[in-house]
Image (cartoon, rainbow, N blue to C red):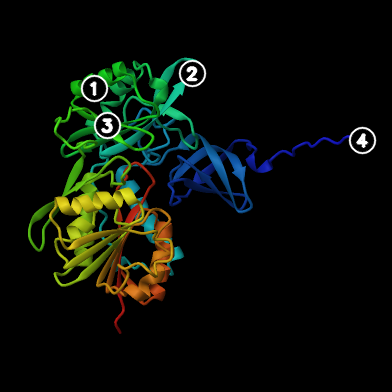
Amino acid sequence: MAQFFKAKPNKSKQLSSKLSLDITQLDHLGAGMAQYQGKVVFVAGGLPDEKVTLQLTEQKKNYAKAKLIKIEQASAQRREPKCPHYVECGGCDLQHLDVEAQREHKQNALVDLMSKLGQDLVSDDIVAPAITGDAWHYRRRARLATVFDKNTHHLQLGFRQTASSKIASITQCSVLAKPLSDLITPFAANLNQLKSKSHLGHLELSQAENGLFAVLRVTKTLPASDIRWLAQFAATYDICLLLQDNDNNLTQLHPQLSTNMEAGKVILPFYSLAIEKPLQQTVRCEFTPGNFVQVNGPVNHDMVAQALNWLDPQVDERVLDLFCGVGNFSLPLASSAAKVIGVEGVPDMVQQAKNNAVLNQLDNLSFHHADLSADLTHEKWLGKIDKLLLDPARAGAFESLQWLKKMRPKKVVYVSCNPASLARDSKVLIEQGYQLSKIGMVDMFPQTHHIEAMALFELNVS
């Protein structure tokens, strides 16, 4: 007798009937929290002190997730989202919360995570004031996705939808620098005029001190007519436009480069960082497409200044900067310390960092490539240092901190984009004889739940 498999219904994914619940607080990802039948219910879009109608969309043993249906009683801190794409776009998920309340929530979430995961390290006297900036139009860089519809022959330009791989077509972005936001609609219209629009990848927009930059990814060589069209568009809108092929080679379409320039040479965007001591000076940091740079220029400037203040590098000290990128912290550090060593895991960024050292005529600064999650035993740069700065990705710096005994810095400044990994890594530092001296929130991404943080650890000498 043949038997056929019949899948059982997945009860954990079934929608419940509509429920009316009270939101009591936000979790560290910005979702509202309620209680139902002994479980914590997470509902995106809900705010503390609100009564909402919701449906459970996923149920686990100790918690459930829910979809917000209706706000029955709104919080006094609720705001009408400014962006017309708020509902469909997956980016700015806290626009419905007053910006001052956003910052208070992030500061509290940071302290809470550190207290829960970091052995109650945080007391009120070590919490620094948050570093903040403009709440809107602060992003100096963004990458927009493209999707070509074979049926309609239309190219979509936009950002990922919430919890989806689909693209939300957008006409503007309320957190993107206004000159870049104003380019989205004309760019979408002009890309749809190209014969080869089915061979286009993402579009990266940047606002730098030397102008507006756009990098268009292309999967095949464009015909001459498309090249001319794009160059004319760039000239009309005064954009430095570059094409990036599958091998990451760059071709500059506008402005046209001098014929006697080195082959493959292009104009690179840059930003500057002002250094106050020991002498007032400015360093210039160039970057190329794909290089990581902080998207919020003014907040990044203040963040670097605070890191230098907390680390307090001296003219006779050796400072190590791990996960250094293109030199965001290393370049300013080299203006104060005797020797600065930057280490980065991405080869292209290491080369750009070296170029930036030459550009700024810094001969006390060296950069090295290394996998900072691997065995560092044989790395020549690893050894006794005076101060340490870390700015890792979301995964944190757990593996790198296993080498603290060999480095033994007096001070460690840890810049984090994930408070959970910062809290975890703080345990390693405490076990190695360090104490948490200062911690503060950096509001790098207003209107989103993302939390940037900075912590200072000092070696106990007693």
Q: Are marks 1 and 4 in contact (CB under 8 Å)?
A: no
Residue 31: % across, % down: 46, 45
Outermost residue, bottom direction?
Answer: 462
Q: Name the residue beneath numbered marker 2.
A: 150
Examine the rendering and report whether any part of residue 434 can be seen: no
Q: CA distance from mark 1 to mark 4?
A: 70 Å
Q: Find the distance from the CA under tag 1 to the CA under tag 2.
A: 26 Å
Closer to the chain start, of discs 2 and 3, is 2
Q: Nearer the viewer, residue 83 or 379?
A: 379
**SS under mark 1:** helix
What is the CA distance from the residue labelled 1 to the residue labelled 3? 11 Å
Q: From the viewer's perspective, is residue 20 above or below residue 431? A: above
Q: Residue at x 35, y 75 (%)?
A: 406
> Going from the N terminus, do you reach mark 3 or mark 4 first?
4
Q: CA distance from mark 2 to mark 3?
A: 27 Å
The residue labelled by disc 3 is: 251
Element carrying mark 3: strand
Type of amino acid under label 1 = Ala
**Mark 3 or 4: the one toward you:** 3
Q: Could you tell me residue 453's position as x and y percent?
A: 32, 56
Q: Which mark identifies residue 231?
A: 1
Q: Amino acid at mark 4?
A: Met
Q: Count neighbours of disc 3 (C-alpha within 10 A) and say few if under 14, some if 14 to 19, many if 20 or more.
A: some
